[in-house]
Amino acid sequence: MRVKIGISPIAWQNDDLPDLTAAFTMEQALKEARQIGYTGVERGQRMPADTEGLRAYLEENDLALCGGWCSGNSLVNDFAAERDAVRAQVEQFVALNSPCIVYAECSNTVQGQIGTPVNDRPQLSKDEIRAYGARITELAKWMADQGMPMAYHHHMGTIIESEDDVNWLMDGSGPEVKLCFDTGHLLFGGGDVLATLNRWGDRVHHVHFKDIRPGIVRDTRGNRRSFLDAVIAGAFTVPGDGCIDFQEVAHALKALDYEGWIVVEAEQDPAKAPPYEYSKMGYDHIVEVCGQAGLTITA
């Protein structure tokens, strides 16, 4: 099976905490990511907004667009309003040959509220999540018709955070709703990484390799800290620097015949975790585990 290795520029340019990474530029992020060996980047807010400008920006650094965040509002928007809200991004991502749009419900998330404990995230019942899944299936079908898969990102602070949330969402949605499987967010949310991956392997379209530091996660939960507090404290890190066994994850991806992008997304304080050093650590670890699992990396 062939995979590609990409990275989110969030270690150099944090969209939610711009002051944290003020000493770094997006140009530095792309240059260093390519020097390390990454062949793709997810879109960041400080990249050019127009399609041709973004294309030139990526080509200058010999990088592909390997996805990008989309803030969904399907809980409050009807299909037509949400379709119109995401249309420009869909058209841009199709033009730039992105593998997917990384979609998450943000209409009521607390992920960006530094004063709100992540424990106080909005929660829906099983039936409500299943109904939400049916709702976004219509949008995912439209995206697929345009040539752009939707990969749903379960994320801390949102309505889809826990393993149960993911299971209910996948159960309630059609096959057009793919999964952006994120190891770090799933474990932070209390889920079983391998069990969830194996259960929904046929829906996994995009993979985020993200490690966690469990002591900081426990502190975040136990002392009712926010998601952003957890990021600043170092709850997340690159593969190989935390507690997740990525060799097992790589073997599971091989068994599932996964072909696609593996993306490092590991936002943390660059004063404690220099972006180049840690991003290289993550890249080297992915190369190692993929090699041992028999996953061929496409340059």
Image: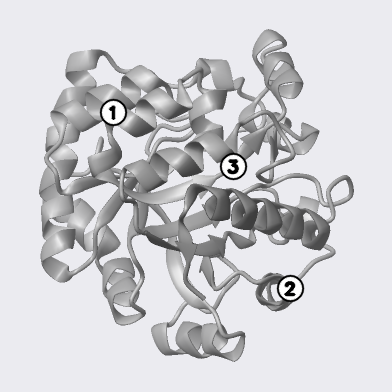
Other-residue count near label 3 (Cα within 10 Å), few / some / many at <14 / 14–19 / ≥20: many
Q: Nearer the viewer, mark 1 or mark 3?
A: 1
Q: Is residue 187 placed above or below 78 in the rendered structure?
A: above
Looking at the rendering, which quadrant does residue 252 occupy? Answer: top left
Q: Nearer the viewer, mark 2 or mark 1?
A: 1
Cβ–Cβ below 8 Å for labels 2 and 1? no
- The three-letter code of the residue at mark 3 reads Lys
Q: Residue at x 28, y 75 (%)?
A: 94
* Observer able to see residue 290: yes
Across and down, in percent, residue 159 comes to: 37, 27
Q: Nearer the viewer, residue 84 or 234?
A: 234
User: How much space separates mark 3 and mark 2, taking CA atoms?
Assistant: 19 Å
Farthest residue toward the right? 271
Which of marks 1 and 2 precedes in the sequence?
2
Q: Is residue 272 placed above or below 55 in the rendered structure?
A: above
* Observer able to see residue 264: no
Q: Is residue 23 placed above or below 19 in the rendered structure?
A: below
User: How much space separates mark 2 and mark 1, taking CA atoms?
Assistant: 36 Å
Determine which of the numbered discs, if any, sits on residue 199 in the image. 1
Q: Residue at x 52, y 16 (%)?
A: 120
Q: Is residue 294 placed above or below 184 in the rendered structure?
A: below
Determine which of the numbered discs, if any, sits on residue 86 in the image. none
Pointer 3: what residue? 210
Disc 1 is placed on an element classified as helix
Pointer 2: what residue? 32
